[in-house]
């Protein structure tokens, strides 16, 4: 018997999407941070669709404050809209909880979701509630729709060899609670796509060791990573920066001739947020094996 642990998350997704009907002419399909729906050439904007889930014991612990869980659940989705150059609009929230869950915990969960929606100008459109068996893990699932201007959409798959790799903020530290306090980089991406549109971009959710090869592979490229250049969160090592995951910073590629101007302009607009060159894309097949990063089905102690 072949198990999920045997094949891993990326191989599972590839198998599953091959089993169902797909849009024959997608603006962007499975494999990007959001799905993209083109409503037709008379429209100036494209629709962005995203779904995400948090599971107790995987994404948060029993003693994690519910309001922080709610913020994280919604902010993860906002981060994916940011990675495409877009904005969130309407959210659907599904919760599946054991029947002995404290009502106050659920109310605080929604307060956290509400905090995030208010911050980024989105609204709740609906949702669903369900029970799970006693002692089962709680599940919070969010689906959302957003939009992006047609000329500002950024994919993972449109960079080229030689393009410079950059990352916002610092990496590592999620194991120590950073994953509950992150700020989706929506304001930064809205500025980027208006001034220095990246050739490819994604958010770092599973760790740079997983996500850098994904971005490079989607663009048909290899990569060269400058480990000594990685911007580290306080108390974090290079290994933490590569493997902790849930940084929710932006990983982007830029044509090299634009990088100096971008860095200078960025420093003037976002003085408190670092933007760091960490390497470049290369010809397909070039790139060191990076250990670490999050795979939902990998064996763990």
Image: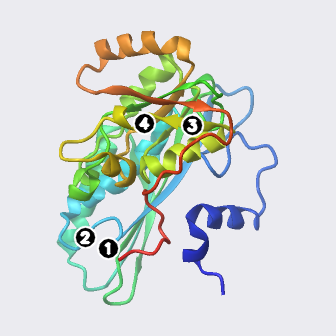
Q: Where is 167 relative to 140, above or below? A: above
Residue 29 vs 230, above or below: the answer is below
Foreground: 250 or 8? 8
Q: Earlier in the sequence, mark 4 or mark 2?
A: 2
Crowding around mark 4 (Cα neighbors within 10 Å: few <14, some 14 to 19, many 20+) is many
Q: Compared with residue 232, is residue 23 higher up or lower down, i.e. above or below?
A: below
Q: Which residue is mark 1?
A: 57
Q: Are marks 1 and 2 in contact (CB under 8 Å)?
A: yes
Q: Secondary structure at mark 1?
A: loop
The numbered disc on residue 250 is: 4
Relative horizontal placement of residue 36, taking residue 129 as reference (left or right): right
The tag earlier along the polypeptide, 4 or 3, is 3
**Cα–Cα span, label 3 and label 1:** 34 Å
Left-right relation of 128 to 266: right
Packing grade of label 3 (10 A; few <14, some 14-19, many >=20) is: many
Residue that label 3 marks? 223
Q: Which residue is mark 2?
A: 61
User: Label 2: few (<14), some or many (≥20) within 10 Å?
Assistant: few
For residue 11, what is the image quadrant? Answer: bottom right
Query: SS for tag 4?
Result: strand
């Amino acid at each position: 018997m072949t198990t999920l642990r045997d094949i891993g998350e990326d191989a599972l997704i590839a198998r599953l999407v091959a089993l169902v009907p797909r849009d024959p002419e997608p603006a962007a399909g499975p494999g990007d941070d959001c799905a993209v729906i083109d409503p037709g050439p008379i429209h100036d904007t494209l629709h962005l669709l995203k779904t995400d889930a948090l599971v107790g014991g995987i994404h948060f612990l029993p003693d994690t404050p519910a309001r922080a869980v709610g913020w994280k659940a919604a902010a993860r989705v906002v981060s994916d809209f940011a990675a495409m150059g877009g904005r969130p609009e309407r959210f659907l929230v599904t919760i599946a909880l054991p029947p002995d869950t404290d009502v106050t915990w659920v109310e605080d969960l929604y307060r956290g979701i509400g905090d995030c929606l208010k911050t980024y100008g989105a609204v709740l459109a609906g949702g669903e509630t369900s029970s799970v068996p006693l002692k089962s893990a709680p599940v919070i699932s969010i689906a959302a729709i957003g939009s992006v201007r047609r000329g500002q959409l950024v994919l993972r798959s449109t960079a080229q060899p030689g393009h410079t790799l950059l990352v916002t903020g610092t990496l590592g530290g999620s194991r120590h609670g950073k994953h509950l306090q992150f700020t989706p980089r929506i304001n930064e991406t809205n500025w980027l796509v208006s001034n220095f549109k990246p050739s490819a971009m994604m958010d770092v959710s599973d760790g740079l060791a997983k996500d850098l090869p994904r971005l490079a592979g989607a663009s048909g490229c290899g990569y060269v990573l400058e480990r000594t250049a990685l911007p580290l969160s306080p108390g974090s090592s290079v290994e933490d920066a590569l493997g902790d995951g849930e940084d929710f910073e932006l990983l982007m590629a830029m044509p090299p001739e634009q990088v100096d101007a971008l860095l200078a302009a960025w420093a003037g607009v976002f003085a408190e947020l670092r933007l760091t060159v960490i390497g470049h894309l290369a010809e397909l097949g070039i790139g060191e094996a990076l250990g670490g990063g999050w795979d939902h089905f990998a064996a763990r102690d």
